[in-house]
Amino acid sequence: MVTIYNLLDENVRRFNAEMSQIVQWEDHETTNNWYPTEKLLNDDRYKVKSVALLAARAKRAFLEYTPIHIDSDDPEKIYRSFNYGPLLDIMMLDMGSYRGQNTENRQTTQSEETEFLGCHQIKWWKQQLLNSQATWKVIGSDMPVGLVVPDGDAAAENLANGDGQPLGRELEMVELLRFIKQKNIKNVVWLTADVHYAAAHYYDPNQAQFQDFTPFWEFVSGPLNAGTFGPNYLNPARPGGAFR
């Protein structure tokens, strides 16, 4: 009934009619802080305890509720790109479907456990960046770049894990940021979500512990209609900690 009510709301109807939208899914499509290899929920609010089943249903609902172009080779692929002429390319990522389990995020080498985007998406993203002739390359990311988002007392939901040199899932982002610098790809801007507040972060290698990257801006947007909290701790290790 809540969904029906929202769709009948005059302001929501006008917004949907007048504004184009490029959408992503995130953890709350399934359950908070979920990951694909998570097994069973220990939560009395859920009658269905299988996270895999909940995730499959959530992804199907997402694809039916918000139709996107279907890749015949991978019908459930959500990451995709959009070209808006010579000025703008938008690259939408999927940071939910391919990640490993939420751990303490302190591994020293990359493995399946430290995956966040997955090898196929990373390869696709690098090629999109190389092919882009647009002035601005905007990355639509459902998780923030450098904000620490915990999962319970010890595990991490996001890539960032706090102070120190890059570890765990951070190693995947380090690879991508190095690639952008090495290939001299200009004007990469991040639009990110998940946390419940808005912020503008400037990542400066001169004020970072990991410094092998090109400076960039990240604009964090909170939900359209949800309670606010924060701000979260900004990781100084990858890539910056400097924001203006």
Image (cartoon, rainbow, N blue to C red):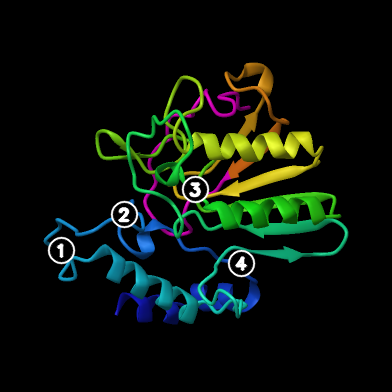
Earlier along the polypeptide chain: callout 1 or callout 2?
A: 2
Q: For residue 22, which numbered disc appears in the image?
A: 4
Earlier along the polypeptide chain: callout 3 or callout 1?
A: 1
Is label 4 in contact with label 1 (beta carbons under 8 Å)?
no
The residue at 85%/50% (across/down) is 135
Earlier along the polypeptide chain: callout 2 or callout 3?
A: 2
- On the picture, is 131 further left or further right than 189? right
The residue at 64%/45% (across/down) is 190
Residue 81 coordinates in the image, percent (x, y) = 69, 63
- On the picture, is 40 further left or further right than 17? left
Earlier along the polypeptide chain: callout 4 or callout 1?
A: 4
Vertical relation: 118 (above or below) 218: below
Residue ID for mark 2: 32
Residue ID for mark 3: 143
- Crowd tier of the residue under label 4, counting other residues whose Cα lies within 10 Å: few below 14, some 14–19, many 20 or above: few
Camera-side residue of 243 and 2: 243
Q: Amino acid at mark 2?
A: Asn
Residue 46 coordinates in the image, percent (x, y) = 17, 66
Is 18 inside the magenta-drawn segment? no
Q: Nearer the viewer, mark 4 or mark 3?
A: 3
Residue 73 coordinates in the image, percent (x, y) = 59, 76
Residue ID for mark 1: 45
Earlier along the polypeptide chain: callout 4 or callout 3?
A: 4
| Stretch in magenta | 220-244
